[in-house]
Image: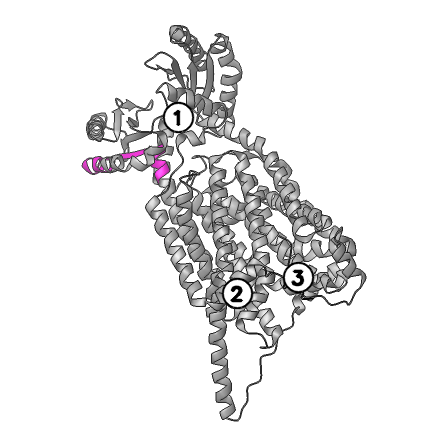
Amino acid sequence: MITPVAKRPLTVRIAGWSAAHPWRAIIGWFLFVALCLGTGIAAGTNSATTEDYRVGEAGRAEAIAAGGGLQRRPVEQVMIHARSGPLDPAAAGIAAKDVTARMKRLPEVDGVAAPVRSDDGTMVLVTVTMKGSELEGKRNVGPLLEQTAQVQRAHPDLVVEETGSPSIGKGVDKQRGDDLALSEAIALPVTLVTLLLVFGSVLMAGVPLLLALSSIAAAMGLSMVVSHVLPDAGVGNNVILLIGMAVGVDYTLFYLKREREERARSGGRLSSEAVVEVVAATSGRAVVVSGLAVIVSTATLYLAADVIFSSLATGTIVVVLVAMASSLTVLPALLVTIDRRTRRREARRTARAAKRGRPREPKREKAEIGRMWSALLRPASKHPGITLCVSVLVMAAMAFPALGMQLRVLNKDSHSREIPALQSYDRLTGAFPELRAQHQVVVSADPSRAREVTGALRALGRRAQADPLFAGNVKPELWTSADGRVSLLELPVPFKLSSGEALESLTHLREDYLPATVGKLPGVEAAVTGDIPRDVDYLANQNEKLPLVVGFLLLLTFVMTVVVFRSVVLGLVGTVLNLLSAVAALGLLVVFFQHGLATTLFGFDPGATGAIGSRVPLFLFVILFGLSMDYQVFVVSRIREAALRGVPTRQAVLDGIGRSAGVVTSAAIVMVTVFASFVFLHLAEMKQIGFSLAVAVLLDAFVIRVMILPSILTLLGRASWWPSRTMRRMQSTPGRQEPAQVPMTL
């Protein structure tokens, strides 16, 4: 009877073809990258619209206002003030007329308001309303800025400057682009040095970097195409660079280190193609499992029903898919090509040495477990109970400050003041504090009740003017749509967006003044929007979605670990440890950013500290759970290989972690470098995300995987593999040899 030959796994078949046709695979990969970039550039990016950002009551109010043609418009303010001393009213008036005339001629401008002088007489303000939607303003504000600059040149004795949401948005985008270039300048050299230390070869160090950068380029192109289905909120390229460098280098690094190990173990008896297939059956499959874990974890962000989180999720999923593809397709071809070149060189050197009568001795294989890692693992192996308790207590102490975490939507008050438009904004709000924020009360009713509605809104305005939390020196403005169905009342608030007074003013408006006036009218729909309500409702939406996303995240992490390793115990252990490292990172984030230690130690802009960005915890949980599965899969799979050979669990733990420790450490250093580079960016939220991810990876690699995980598995012994019958059988007959490359379940 002929025994059927088992079908080779897909990863092995792909690697086998790539190894057999290396130049086809290499050329094909770079054609794929070029195609992705070209298609993306041709398709362009479909940016999210104002409607995509609407959340809660504020979003409902904006929808009502838009239905009546009263939606928010992009507005710019041109300020005129003296360079020193008192302002000359006549000179300021001439400059204001010049501004008005120039702006009215621009096709981007819808209207220009009459000049207004500040109460202290130090500034004259010209307000310019632009055409188009609110988000279109920053794309069209260029001509307005140019006209303001020309007015400044025409009136050198005065200061003529411009600010507003469009120019601030344009400045933030420019700063974000500069920051991305800075992060690349920091991360690339450090990553290259790390890889040189790992491989000792410029050629081998260049392979992970080349694949990571090409994966990022392809992902950016693909994300442009995908944006026509899932709109981009402007954060896609940030996350593609952040995650692409991390996983792109990591996946290649894991693959390369295993290839070196298998080649050394074979002693030259296996061909390059055979070695690559062996690696594809182990590390190749681990890359697939790790990549799928990151993708599944990240996909939970879609549950937040938020356009920004959706953009973050899309960027991450696209770049991880591309990084996986590069590791499975072109990497085997590169390895075979490099190995053939190396063997030819070695053969020539050996032949030359033989002619000289000095035969070369073959290189000796280094010890699989170095002395340093043997020393680091000794506490977990000798005293697992004590090591576990101490490590968990340390992590719990780090996590404790997270209980006092204060979340805040990071708005223009927290942006870097290196942006010229924000410097102008600060001068504007100093002279006109009522322009810091506005509440808009929007009411929808039958046109026959328009007079009744406007009367109620005027009564509401009088109540607000008498409240010190509102700008009493400015009369509230009231608009009604042409058809009389929608009315809008604007109430200025002279406090910063995130201040306690601003938040309290919204509470008074929504809970007291609105119910006492408009709320008494039957059959009308009323809601409040504005910068402050937007932030409040967005934060409330995030707090509502956080338990749902984290709950699904924990469940999916558990299920994936159980499926991969066929162990409920490992599923529970992995989920709890991922949660522990995430919460510990949040605790340190609170200490450094909320309590201001980052400002004290590193001189960070105080605007980046004082509170935690509302999106940071959710993004941290999701991305960290996915990345932690990288280490979980690679470390535990090595332990499982040893255990399947009949090695007792205690020794299998030491062997598996010891053999993977070097590559995990190298991968962690690369990840930490990439994430830490974001700490030097200007955007407060990116600083916090970079810091928290860098800290979390450090804790995961050096505390969770070196101290806590081996301690737990050593204490559990054979119970670690419950309910897997195969593992229990192998552990009950120690010494029995099984193939080392036992595939994991996908």
- Name which of mark 1 and mark 3 comes first in the sequence: 1
Image: 263 above or below 405: below
Return the x and y of residue 421 as percentages of the image width and height: 34, 37
Q: Which residue is mark 2?
A: 16
Helix, strand, or loop for circle 2?
A: helix
Image: 613 above or below 738: above
Q: CA distance from mark 1 to mark 3?
A: 69 Å
- Pointers 2 and 1 in contact (CB under 8 A)? no
Return the x and y of residue 510 as percentages of the image width and height: 51, 18
Image: 211 above or below 161: below
Q: Which residue is mark 1?
A: 433
Q: Which residue is mark 3?
A: 742
- Name which of mark 2 and mark 1 comes first in the sequence: 2
Q: Point out the stretch of residues depicted in magenta.
A: 149-170
Q: CA distance from mark 3 to mark 2?
A: 18 Å
At 43% across and 50% down in the image, what residue appears?
Answer: 219
At 61% across and 51% down in the image, what residue appears?
Answer: 629
